[in-house]
Image: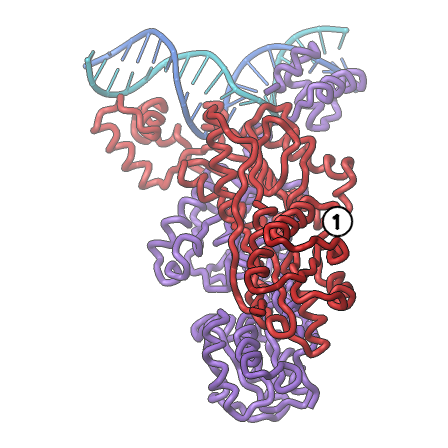
Chain colours: A purple, B red, C blue, D cyan
Amino acid sequence: MITLKEIAKECGVSTATVSNILNGKNKVSEETREKVMAVVKERGYKLNYVAQGLRKQKTQTIGVIAEDIVQFTTPEIIEGIMEVCEERGYRTIVQNLRLYSRWQDLWFDNDKMYYSVMDPAVQEMASIRVDGIVYVAGHARNIHRFPSEYQIPSVLAYAYSQEKDVPSVVIDDEEGARLIVEHLIKKGHTKIGVMAGEQENIHTKLRVLGYQKALFDAGILYNPELICYAGWGKELSYGAAEKLLSKDITAIFCMSDRNAGGVYKYLFEKGKQAGRDISIVGFDDEMISDFMTPRLTTMRIDRLQIGKSAMELLFDKMEGKEVPDEIKVPCRLIDRESVLKL
Amino acid sequence: MITLKEIAKECGVSTATVSNILNGKNKVSEETREKVMAVVKERGYKLNYVAQGLRKQKTQTIGVIAEDIVQFTTPEIIEGIMEVCEERGYRTIVQNLRLYSRWQDLWFDNDKMYYSVMDPAVQEMASIRVDGIVYVAGHARNIHRFPSEYQIPSVLAYAYSQEKDVPSVVIDDEEGARLIVEHLIKKGHTKIGVMAGEQENIHTKLRVLGYQKALFDAGILYNPELICYAGWGKELSYGAAEKLLSKDITAIFCMSDRNAGGVYKYLFEKGKQAGRDISIVGFDDEMISDFMTPRLTTMRIDRLQIGKSAMELLFDKMEGKEVPDEIKVPCRLIDRESVLKL
DNA sequence: AATTGTAAGCGCTTACAATT
DNA sequence: AATTGTAAGCGCTTACAATT
């Protein structure tokens, strides 16, 4: 591998001169510049930015720590981060904690497990002196001990921060839920069941709130009996569908598309259809929602935007600007065919 | 950020000694080791592996170049790569070319576009002296000019190599197609239409081959009229469904789950059902296949395994072992409810 | 004044010398 | 022989000096 020193030698100039040229300093004659650039090009030379970062004590690199890149929201969030980084000429280095692959959900309540992979990851980011860190959660949770001891500017993407000084970008769960329930109400529904996620989950709580608000605004009584907690997956909602459907409702607000998938499965087996016999809405706008029959009306989570906003927030923080503690990315209604007008 | 030098100073020993301890060299007294390790721990010191790599001229790092991490196969392939890297104590650095985000499909036939982002990526990998590169394609294609001039051991994941010396890991498209069509035949189907992908695509060609083989093995005449090329997405197959269905067939082999989704949509609108009025199978085992009603029978692409195999292949290559030019990861039939027994 | 070179140093490792 | 330290160098940048 060719080095700057060799380029310098081949051109008969000093390394300082080559370095100045490569870094666009203007104290070099046009003649020398051309000569050097010709050789650089010919030899396909590229600065070793690792060595450069070491020397400059400035890496122009953002560290991305992802809980698990296999989570459906994560790749697009990272893509958003990378897009903004690229615009600004920053490099990106990603650590994949592989939390779910390692331990499924077990690490949620097990700080020892969690920090056994989390701490080394942050330490490594610190040791290579990234300029900032964005932490990408698999789904929204409270992150209560984000290591700030290294004084690296950090932000959270898709997680709620408990740490002063670590701002976060989340989605507007409450407003999203309110909007989609309002949509149902506008279509004439007043008896609306909820297929909810895990009861203790933040998304769940916030979306219940949004649901309640929409009911209140429409003057509809809130009946706690109509809420059914069924985790986030398909199977539990499939199992819970019969009971929920047996209540006196005309629509179900599912807190995830996967939950809606469980309900669809139950309906299918009974020869029934969303959008005809009952109305169903989801949340997430995962690809599955567009492939269900009929296509599922749902709330879009703008994952790319979460990534972009998080990265912009981080840049602001790195530049010492005043930044908000939390940014809420709005959700958007994707109106398809699973809701019946009464 | 604390450095090795500072640790040395604080312990009253030389940097060489600290370095030896941290690298597990045995020429250090137990006493000194304990003293130093205590300080290391207390101060939360971590070796800067970037500096280490620079000095050692050995980075213990694998470069991953992904065409686009948003492609549905990519995150799991990367996860597989990272899993085996972690086992072996290697670090990983990922470049996301964002080819699809930038240009949709336009870059396929535009080498200039392609290499304008590809070349710098490889160069950067080379300049930081990664020990090996795995290139992760968004979907299988021929990669005809993988820059080998840098002499970094490289492998391709999910792409066919045209380059001697750059082996690749692909899926066994032909056998996968043969198996699923055989499955259809075993269920009594003899008149089987094909909703195929892009005509010039390698997957498509190989899967047509597998289809033909299965027919031949069963003594069924191959009728080219029964093949309908409809790209990979949902919309085109939706549009093509009517025509294909109008032919005298009892089953459709769709070359992607998304293609199957298009057919499902058409059937749904006509009040028909897969697995009852006609049999449908897909390919890919994307999450959508499990959410269709009825759930789609399909071929699973083992994406994690592609990543793992690619990485193991690369390690073998790095160790100078003889390696095969190509590894085919088998596909696995996921038998669900979209096929009717005749 | 404009252009170029010298030499030190970023955080490490390692051959070799020095010390016990 | 076992343990420790010295000093050079990986590929760069940059303050400053030297040259034109």
Residue A73 in view, yes or no: no
Image side of residue A273 versus residue B81, left or right: right
- Which chain is mark 1 on? B
Q: Which residue is mark 1?
A: B199
Residue appearing at x 52%, y 56% in the figure: B333
Position of the C terminus of chain A by quadrant: bottom right
B122 up-or-down from B268: above or below: above
Q: Judge by depth and name the residue closer to the eye, B36 or A287.
A: A287
Residue B320 in the image: x percent, y percent?
Answer: 47, 24
Residue appearing at x 63%, y 71% in the figure: B274
Q: Judge by depth and name the residue closer to the eye, A110 or B34.
A: A110
Residue appearing at x 68%, y 85% in the figure: A340
Residue B154 in view, yes or no: yes
Residue appearing at x 58%, y 91% in the figure: A191
B214 up-or-down from B91: above or below: below
Residue A264 in the image: x percent, y percent?
Answer: 57, 77
Q: Amino acid at mark 1?
A: Gln
Residue A328 in the image: x percent, y percent?
Answer: 61, 66
How many marks overall?
Answer: 1
